[in-house]
Image (spheres, helix red, strand yellow):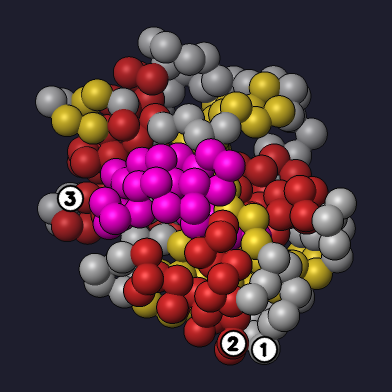
């Protein structure tokens, strides 16, 4: 089945057509800038524009950077507070005219990485982290997702981990790769006191440059960069939408 996968992020809203039986992209990836302020109506308009650019009228799967329960945004750590309580699914369905499923962006990326990336065939405990504007997290045991885990909100250095160690913080504070890696190591150290993944997969846009920071990283778990890099969110959102929409279509 072909589904338009969309990944709503802090700086860009990306989309591509995904073949959900293989996880492969069936089109170019398009990226539009996330509007600022990223209010529900402004973001919805950009998603509608993306859908128009694809001339798409089929189903949508969308990853969104918040806790999502039943299509509704429950948190707004790195997005406009106006999103809290908004039924993102209904909003995007209304503005695009397409059936739509919305999940947490890191959950979407994690599912793709488990099915088609570096988590493939792993049945032990796998943590997928997305390093971008914030820190997203998706935890799997025996291939099953524990949804809406917010490790970016883990207390670290008097604030949240994502305010100290997200990829955007490295850029903002002009940290060297090594100093940023030290922050990540501290984060791993703290979370490994609570959960014990066997494997940590590091995703997000920065995973394209993994050779710059992987040599400095250490954790109890095995550490590897994401295979699908920044496409994981698009692919996973489409695959998850397929599962829940298939019965209705
Ligand atoms: C949000 C998460 C999201 C992560 C990555 C965090 O600020 O709370 O839900 O997965 O950013 O976008």
Q: Earlier in the sequence, mark 3 or mark 1?
A: 1
Residue 183 location in percent, x, y? 25, 34
Tell me the SS state at disc 1.
Answer: loop
Disc assigned to residue 124? none
Residue 198 location in percent, x, y? 59, 20
Determine the residue positioned at 58% across, 42% down. 70
Q: Is residue 179 left or right of residue 26?
A: left
Asked if the residues shown at circle 2 and circle 1 are in contact, with their CB atoms under 8 angstroms apart, the answer is yes
Q: Nearer the viewer, residue 208 or 240?
A: 240
Determine the residue positioned at 64% across, 85% down. 54
Q: Quadrant of residue 56?
A: bottom right
Residue 240 to residue 45: above or below: above
Pointer 3: what residue?
Answer: 175
Q: Nearer the viewer, residue 89 or 24?
A: 89
Residue 154 location in percent, x, y? 31, 26
Tell me the SS state at disc 3.
Answer: loop
- Quadrant where the N terminus sits is bottom right
Calculate the distance from the C-alpha at mark 3 to the C-alpha at mark 2.
39 Å
- Quadrant where the C terminus sits is bottom right
Disc assigned to residue 52? 2
Q: Earlier in the sequence, mark 3 or mark 2?
A: 2
Region of the chain picked out in magenta, as a range: 61-88
Disc assigned to residue 55? 1
């Amino acid at each position: 089945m072909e589904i338009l996968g969309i990944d709503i992020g802090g700086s860009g809203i990306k989309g591509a057509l995904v073949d959900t039986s293989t996880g492969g992209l069936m089109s170019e990836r398009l990226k539009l800038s996330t509007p600022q302020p990223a209010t529900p109506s402004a973001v919805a308009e950009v998603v509608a524009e993306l859908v128009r650019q694809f001339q798409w009228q089929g189903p949508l799967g969308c990853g969104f950077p918040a806790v999502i329960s039943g299509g509704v945004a429950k948190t707004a750590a790195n997005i406009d507070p106006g999103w809290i309580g908004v039924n993102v699914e209904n909003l995007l369905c209304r503005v695009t005219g397409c059936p739509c499923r919305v999940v947490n962006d890191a959950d979407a990326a994690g599912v793709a990485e488990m099915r088609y990336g570096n988590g493939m065939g792993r049945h032990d405990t796998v943590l997928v982290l997305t390093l971008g504007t914030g820190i997203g997290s998706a935890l799997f045991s025996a291939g099953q997702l524990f949804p809406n885990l917010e490790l970016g909100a883990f207390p670290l250095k008097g604030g949240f981990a994502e305010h100290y160690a997200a990829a955007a913080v490295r850029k903002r504070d002009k940290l060297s790769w090594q100093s940023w890696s030290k922050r990540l190591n501290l984060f791993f150290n703290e979370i490994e006191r609570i959960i014990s993944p066997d494997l940590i997969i590091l995703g997000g846009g920065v995973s394209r440059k993994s050779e710059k920071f992987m040599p400095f990283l250490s954790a109890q778990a095995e550490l590897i960069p994401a295979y699908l890099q920044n496409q994981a969110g698009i692919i996973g959102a489409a695959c998850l939408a397929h599962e829940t929409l298939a019965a209705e279509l």
